[in-house]
Each structure stands twice: as structure tokens, then as C-alpha cells.
Image (tube, grey):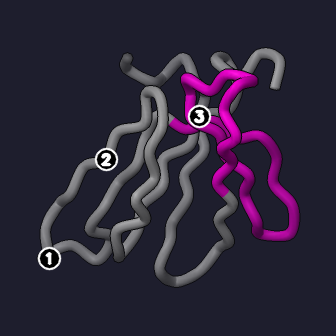
Amino acid sequence: VRGLAGGTAVAVYSTQSLTLSGPRVTVQEFGPAFRYRYRYEGLRLLTARSGTYYLLPAGWTPRMHLTYILSDSDQIRIELYAAEQVIP
């Protein structure tokens, strides 16, 4: 997790609420008119394997026992981008 703050940033779009939370994690709800109704930001990619993404909140600390594990599906869309593009 060294360099987590500058690591790959993640935005998760979901058709249903995932209740992702943690330091610097935000959620935006677009409403029922949108296929992906929720967008979660403030996440960092720990690793990805075979369509499964292991994510940490951007403000993660070693005292936190929190890792989000999400798999590719029709219900979830995951976007990866450079952390410096993230607006604090």
C-alpha cells in the first residue's frame, strides 16, 4: 500500500447502492433515469486479478481493517485513472 495516495484512482458505477464508505470516499446518486445510478469515488486500486478488483479508500491507514472486493458484472462498472486527475 505504499504510495496509495498517488496510485491508480477508481470510480465505481453501480445500478444499486453498494454503501461503500471510508476516508475520502464519496457517493453521488444520479437518480432512476440512469442505468448506473450511483458513482463512488475516493478509492484506490490495491490490485486486480481475473476481473476482481481490490480497493481501498484513498484515506486508508494501517489501522483500518477495510478492503472492498468487487467483481466485474452487468451491475457494476469500474473506471481506472491516474490519481492526479482526482479533484480533492
- Distance of mark 1 from mark 3, alpha carbons? 26 Å
86 in relation to 57, above or below = above
56 in relation to 79, above or below = above
Q: Which residue is mark 2?
A: 27
Task: Give residue 36's quadrant in the image.
Answer: bottom left
Mark 1 and mark 3 residues within 8 Å of each other at the beta carbon? no
Q: Which residue is mark 3?
A: 9
User: Which of the two residues, 16 or 76, is positioned nearer the viewer here?
Assistant: 16
Q: Position of residue 84 (x, y in %)?
A: 54, 17
User: Which of the two residues, 21 or 5, is positioned nearer the viewer here?
Assistant: 21
Answer few, some or many: residues within 10 Å of disc 3's Cα (few below 14, many 20 plus, some between 14 and 19): many
Q: In the rendered structure, which disc, 1 or 3, sits on the residue that comes first in sequence?
A: 3
Q: Amino acid at mark 3?
A: Ala
Task: Give residue 31's quadrant in the image.
Answer: bottom left
Within the magenta stretch, is there residue 57? Answer: yes
Q: In the rendered structure, which disc, 1 or 2, sits on the residue that comes first in sequence?
A: 2
Q: Which residue is mark 1?
A: 32
**What secondary structure is marked by label 1?**
loop
- Distance of mark 3 from mark 2, alpha carbons? 15 Å
Q: Which residues are magenta?
A: 43-68
Q: Residue at x 50, y 71 (%)?
A: 76
Would residue 40 appear left or right of 27 to someone viewing this image? right
Mark 1 and mark 2 residues within 8 Å of each other at the beta carbon? no
Q: Residue at x 77, y 40 (%)?
A: 46
Q: Residue at x 14, y 76 (%)?
A: 32
